[in-house]
Image: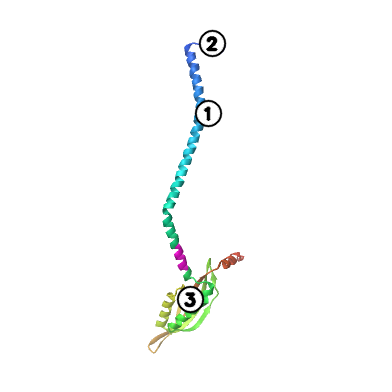
Amino acid sequence: MDPRVEKILKLPNKQKIGILVAVVLIEAVALVWFLYLPKHRLLTDLRSQQVKLKAEVEEKTRIANNLPKIQKEYAELNLELEKALTELPNSKEIPSLLTSITATGKNAGLDFLVFRPKPEVKKDFYAEVPVDITVAGSYYSVANFFAAVANLPRIVNIANVDFAEVKNVNNRMMTKVTCLATTFRFLGKEEITNDTNKPKKK
């Protein structure tokens, strides 16, 4: 028998128990350190991944459930955009729009004294197209003209309205009206690009 073992066997029972307890504790610590802790860390990581994946699944499920609603909203936005596009003419339609404004005035019984397009004012994605207008006619004709312009399929704003030379002619109140009519048009991609590339004034 190994002398070391014989020496341990000859020890009092209390020392034998102490040695046994020490051996068991060492084995327990070794098991915890080398087996339990790595498995525990792995289990913790897997649970964390599970929680994350569960949250992703719930989010994607929520999006999937809302997909019909999102598609409906997208279609409605497209319709609104198409409607907006019909109200803002492109550059090719501006001359015909201006012609329709003069025709509307003449149909209302007005005489055009001034119809002077002014330089465009470019904004972010559209341009304002202002026109100085001076017409002569009755109050009734002027009111009809403004109402007809408001009902045009394109957007035309009337501003800076000034009445002058008001007089009674054959029981009709006649006047000369000066105003600024402004319509709008979308800028093409090239116009926006060119405008962006221009050096800014200091």
Closer-to-camera residue (187/45)? 45
Check if mark 1's residue and mark 2's residue have beta carbons within 8 Å: no
Q: Which residue is mark 1?
A: 34
Which numbered circle lies on residue 181? Answer: 3
Give the dominant element type of the magenta stretch: helix, strand or loop: helix
Number of marks drawn: 3
> Which quadrant is home to the C terminus?
bottom right
* Secondary structure of the residue carrying numbered label 1: helix
Q: CA distance from mark 1 to mark 2?
A: 32 Å
Q: Which residue is mark 2?
A: 6
Rendered residue at 46%/46% (across/down): 56
Check if mark 3's residue and mark 1's residue have beta carbons within 8 Å: no
Q: Earlier in the sequence, mark 3 or mark 1?
A: 1
Rendered residue at 49%/16% (across/down): 18
> Which quadrant is home to the N terminus?
top right
Q: CA distance from mark 3 to mark 1?
A: 86 Å
* Secondary structure of the residue carrying numbered label 3: strand
